[in-house]
Image: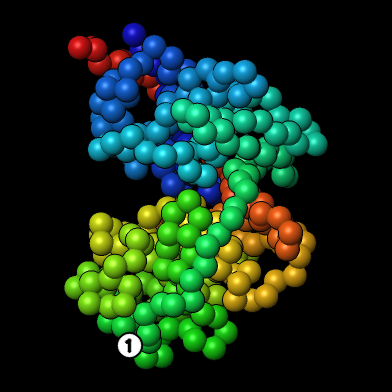
Amino acid sequence: MDYVFHTVDVFTPTPFNGAQITVFPKADGLTARQMQIMAREINHPETVFILPGKNNVSAELKVFSPQSERAVGSHSVVAAARALVHSAALPVAEQGSSTQFSQSDKIFDVVLSQVDGRLLTQLSMSVSAQIDRYVPDAKELQAVLGLGPHDIETLKAKTLFVSCDSSYLIVPLRSLDAVYRARFNLEAWARSSAGSAPVNEILVYCRETESLQTDFHLRILGAHIAQDESPPVGAAIPAFVAGLCETRGLADGTHALWLERGHKAQRQSVLKVEFVKKATAAMVVRVGGDAVMVASGTMRAPENE
């Protein structure tokens, strides 16, 4: 049987930019083994398979990298919504609308809106962060990141351990140049005071950006990330926002940011982030952005054993 797929460039209004995601909008009938084979054949960072949702859930998502099944993230939600709207399987009201996607027993709240004729999709989540100010000292951070004493910001922002669903060491840097000179040194990490911390990745960021629209530039580093890679940052956004609230003393209320990942010449992503901070409740964070369809086709399902 042949299955229709769409290739969606996520977190960008411009084709051939942002994050490449392939979506199969009608994947019912496929097994997990078949999905894995098809994702490996496509060889994009992630392939999203959409199954019929249950109860009030619009769709169930299954996400695979070429190697394994993955958790749903903001980029996979944005890609799925764009493909479903394109297929007329998901309506969007002029004044905006909301829906729900799921992955197994986990349900995701999704906000859809029309902005200047384009579809803006945001994954909405409630965040309760744990923050630890006991972090590696300046010399340890320099060794871990391969940076000099003037590259790490210490006056206007602070390095923090922040844990939401995932844990990150969040390190502010002083320039875009420092963000891309940073190199994760596993030996230095193991020797540092953070060596035993349950953190797999470091989020570095700076106020310098390539776009006038954006407020911060972000990059993820880690032991399993190639030195020249700039992987998606969506999963780290709740921790990043919680860290900003901690270091900048933001007032209660609604705040909005635009974030960028990657260079413009190398598939840059731009994410819209909104968050509602309340002293007496968990923070609500919405992460999303634009997406554009770039290709469609069909793939024959592999034989199932």
Looking at the picture, how far across and down is residue 261, in whole percent?
A: 47, 60
Residue 164 % position (x, y): 51, 55
Residue 292, above or below 279: above
Residue 6 located left or right of residue 37: right
Q: Is residue 18 above or below residue 90?
A: below
Q: Which residue is mark 1?
A: 139
Furthest toward the bottom, the residue is 149
Q: Quadrant of the N terminus?
A: top left
Nearest the viewer among 65 and 213 is: 65
Q: How many marks do you count on the picture?
A: 1
Which residue does the image show at 53% across and 37% down from the upper left? 77
User: Residue at coordinates 28% horizontally, 36% vertically from top-left?
Assistant: 68
Residue at the farthest right position: 95
Percent x, y of residue 161: 45, 69
Left or right of residue 20: residue 140: left
> Do we see residue 175 in this rendering?
no
Residue 209 to residue 92: above or below: below
Q: Dot 1 lies on which element? A: helix
Residue 202 lies, in percent from the top left, at: 38, 66
Is residue 11 in view from this perspective? yes
Rendered residue at 68%/25% (across/down)? 91
